[in-house]
Amino acid sequence: MVSEQGQSTKNVCVIGAGPSGLVAARELRKEGHTAVVLEQNHDIGGQWLYEPNVEKEDPLGKNKFLDVHSSVYDSLRIVSPREIMGFTDFPFVSKKNRDTRRFPGHKELWLYLKDFCEYFGLKEMIRFNTRVEYVGMLDYGVFGKDLKWVVKSKEKKGEKRVEEVFDAVIVATGHYSQPRLPSIKGMDAWKRKQIHSHVYRVPEPFRNEVVVIVGNSLSGQDISMEIVKVAKEVYLSAKSLEVTEGLSKVISKHRNLHLYPQIQSLHEDGRVEFEDGSCVIADTIIYCTGYSYAFPFLDTKGIVGVDDNRVGPLFEHTFPPSLAPSLSFIGIPRKLIGFPFFESQAKWIAQVLSGKRELPSYDDMMLSIKEFYRSRELAGIPVSDTHDIANFEYCDKYADYSESPHLEEWRKQLCLSAIVNSFTNLETYRDSWDDGDDELLQQALQSPHFTQLGIQP
């Protein structure tokens, strides 16, 4: 269909009503498209819709379709200050009678997304309790702009199945759900409790236990600091014993928290043997080993795959060249300021679908991907970290595709300041910061980002 301005309007399916899916819906509508968002849960929020009941989930998350999407634990607080997290035209302000901390708990971020959804009237575009079971090409072999997609979905609580055809599909299913597990000798034979942090919620079940926590990433550190208060002993097994000053302070403060090397093997009698030859007998092992990208519903005839956590081939982490623009992904990149980046992705996709912007040729996109992979390889970055960005310049360059605004300087500086502070003061960085942050905060709160809606923070 072509609009009066000569731009085409498409019928688009967005999979997932988390932050990426919500902003995708908004941008698609803004650009004149018709969009439906399919969401497997009863409400919006994706990862941020807290699910305390995890009993029905496999403790290591080995099911193809997970029962529980969110990996958020009860005490989780965001790791970035709220001022930097908001979408560009909807600041994440603190509200009366809510969690007003600069680094609030997960519920506050979920409420922000609810506010965003309500403010922009997105709820009417969402079909809840609908699990997508299959997404595939309508006429395999017909490539290019006329490619259409079959989407099969099922009502979560009933048996009703629906099959629909769309001009385009945007995958916005997040990347913190499918557990990524290490391969450890004896893991299958170890009879005691093993869980992935995906199903960790509260520390109480581990009271008086000897717990081994594998991985000292953000969740590994958070969960260690929480469990150490109730467990008998906690052994934090890390790839490197060179840890940040912040973690070092925490370990020295707790007599029952110990830093150990990686696990060599597990034994049926409950022994956990480490690479330095030392052993402990543990009750529970918690794997804080991250997540894998997984799209169990997606059938692209092998065109898009996940290999060692690299989703590809994707031009700019977004478009698979031979299926673009009718298939795209939002929210694949990590290690960046998420919401503004997802917003620039959504804008670009919506504009490419309407014909306002054009993608490079197939050959040029494939060459760009090849060069990107090569540059990562030369920099010594493992394939599994392909989508870790950690580069503000890249985010600004990406924003240019849709003429989205660049990240404000205060946003970048507040982000870096929180990271540096966490390295030094792991236990306290969310509640105390230096005067430099206060100056940046003033800049932020007086900037157009915060004053645009006339809301007083």
Image: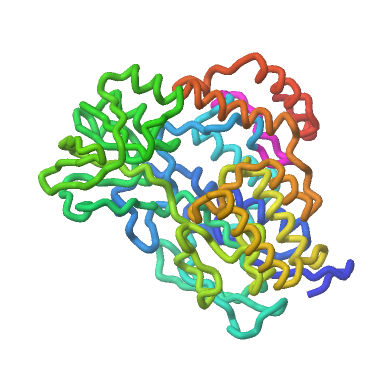
- Closer to the camera in the image, 240 or 170: 240
Residue with the most extreme left position: 269
Residue 339 location (% of width, % of height): 64, 44
Residue 117 location (% of width, % of height): 64, 46
Q: Is residue 406 left or right of residue 172?
A: right
Residue 254 location (% of width, % of height): 31, 19
Please tell me which residue is depicted at 58% across the width and 27% down the height of the picture. Answer: 418
Q: Is the magenta stretch mostly helix, strand or loop?
A: loop
Above-or-below relation of 403 to 361: above
Residue with the most extreme top position: 435
The answer, for residue 358, to whether it is visible in the render is yes
- Closer to the camera in the image, 119 or 148: 148
Q: Is residue 203 magenta?
A: no
Q: Is residue 90 magenta?
A: yes
Q: Is residue 252 left or right of residue 414?
A: left
Please tell me which residue is depicted at 76% across the width and 42% down the height of the picture. Answer: 406
Above-or-below relation of 109 to 398: above
Write the start and end of the magenta stretch as one range.
86-101
- Closer to the camera in the image, 190 or 83: 190
**Picture mark count:** 0
Residue 240 falls in which quadrant of the image? top left
